[in-house]
Amino acid sequence: YSKTYQLTISTNKKRDYVSLSVDVAVRPKLAIGHILMALFILIGLYAMIIFELVHQTLAAMIGATVAIACLAVVGERPSSVEILTWMDVETMKLLFGMMVLVSILSETGFFDYVALLTYKLAKGKIWALVTSLCLVTAFLSAFLDNVTTILLMSAMTIRLCETMNIDPKHMLIAMVIFSNIGGAMTPIGDPPNIIIINNRKIQDAGIGFGVFTLHMVPIVLISLAATYGLVRLMYRDPAKLRYTDPPEIVERKHEIEKWKRAFYSLSGYSREDDLVRDSLHQKISTLEASLKRTPHYTNKISEDDYRDHLKELSKTFRVKNKSLLLKSGVVIGVVILLFFLESIPGLKLSIGWIAILGAIFLLVLGDFDELESILSRVEWSTLLFFGALFVVMEVQVVVDIADQEETKLPIKPLVFALALGACLGGNGTLIGASANVVTAGIAEQHGYRFSFFDFFRIGFPVMLLTTTLSTGYLIFCHVWLGWND
């Protein structure tokens, strides 16, 4: 830090030499200017996302660029190689691989068929559907990572909501909240847990798959029960989950929005673009005029409506490609099996590479003529968002605290507190967890965009409730009972 220090040691020993051991820990104090710059960047990033000044991906890229510029100003400019080490490449590989696998699976009609089965089991009842989807999502998130679970469940959920005239954003928000809680149960359930369990010092402390899961299961089950009760309280009137308009009106409005997105996507730089834009504008005007003439009836689904919907869905929601479904099922099953085996010492499997190799293998088996159609479903903006935000610091901080001789804190409760804080705290805001961002991206891709405040209204109270319960649990188990083995 551009300063030279001299260490002088004297001794009263009458020898020509003496043995010494000197440990030097350089911990410079942060200047007030550095703190203000960091605070400015953080507030600016949140302001851009909360008030939707720009797209969240662009906001993250702006924040990352400004942060690097500030480091350069204070004389600590990082190299490109150092910047790359800040990104959690393992999680990004996992996201990309699973996105490709899910996009291929969607080609088979699997999600449509599962949506039909779930609709039959729920019998058109909203809370039966909400309960089943949330519990299944939480269970799957414990054994898959929650991002993978959301990728698998979102397409099916949107189909079901469209069928039952439910606003998908409410269901997706509830699902991702349960996914974040369920993912806290195991080391492979949430990206922060993957980062934590892969730390060498934490592994040396004896925290493996079994120990981690044993300590986390009780509080996760308590949190799931408490969250379900809170969500039921927030949506005690099931009509809030439904659209105010009947399905025909909702479908027409959704169709108009799709045509509008196509209209705005054309640049208008050429004569052909202008002709297409004119045609789209006429199409939109016609649909809007027909929408005004459509009578509005009640949106309540009767028993007859349920039977009619079931007959209609049975004709259209079926498996389209059984051969590809079989191949996809085998490959995804092997990938999930390898996820479990990854925790076995000595195998040295990488979760990210498992997903990548599984995606490549399924692409080869599928023999697709148009690879672009598969890659177009990958949420590239979500990957860019993570690339701009991933700076992994949490685990090292915990290890440093546990290593302090003055505190002599056991590392295990610190690790569990970190995992619970990262997983449950992620429900507080839209950008609090990777699964939240993925869910928002999928919803926007299907035309059901929800805002920062839409998520905040549900997620923040859940976050306060579950983190309070977790704090009490950790104090009871590790302070009163001394369960640190």
Image: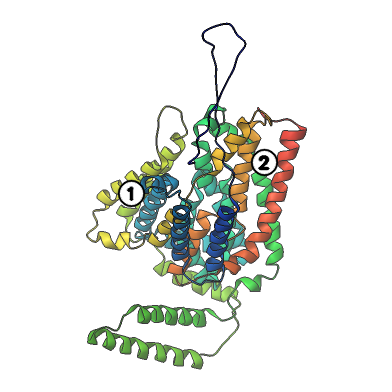
Q: Mark 1 to mark 2: distance in Å?
A: 35 Å
Residues at marks 1 and 2 touching, judged by CB atoms closer than 8 Å? no
User: Can you see residue 351?
Assistant: yes
Label 1 Cα crowd, 10 Å radius (few <14 / some 14-19 / many 20+):
many
Label 2 Cα crowd, 10 Å radius (few <14 / some 14-19 / many 20+):
few
Quadrant assignment for the C terminus = top right
Please state the horizontal and vertical placement of residue 201, each as a whole percent of the image: 53, 30
Question: Which sits in the foreground, 79 or 249?
Answer: 79
Question: Which sits in the foreground, 189 or 405?
Answer: 405
Splitting the image into 4 quarters, where does residue 464 fall? bottom right
Location of residue 48 with respect to 84 vertically, above or below: below
Question: What amino acid is at disc 1?
Answer: Ala
Please state the horizontal and vertical placement of residue 454, each as a whole percent of the image: 59, 69
Mark 2 lies on a secondary structure that is helix
User: Can you see residue 117?
Assistant: no
Location of residue 293 with respect to 395 vertically, above or below: below
Q: In the image, which disc is placed on residue 218?
A: 2
- Outermost residue on the top side: it is 14
Question: Which sits in the foreground, 474 or 279?
Answer: 474
Residue located 27% across and 88% down the image: 275
Mark 1 lies on a secondary structure that is helix
Q: Which residue is mark 1?
A: 359
Residue located 47% across and 52% down the image: 71
Relative placement, left or right, of 439 versus 406 is left
Question: Which sits in the foreground, 264 or 107?
Answer: 264
Location of residue 250 with respect to 369 vertically, above or below: below
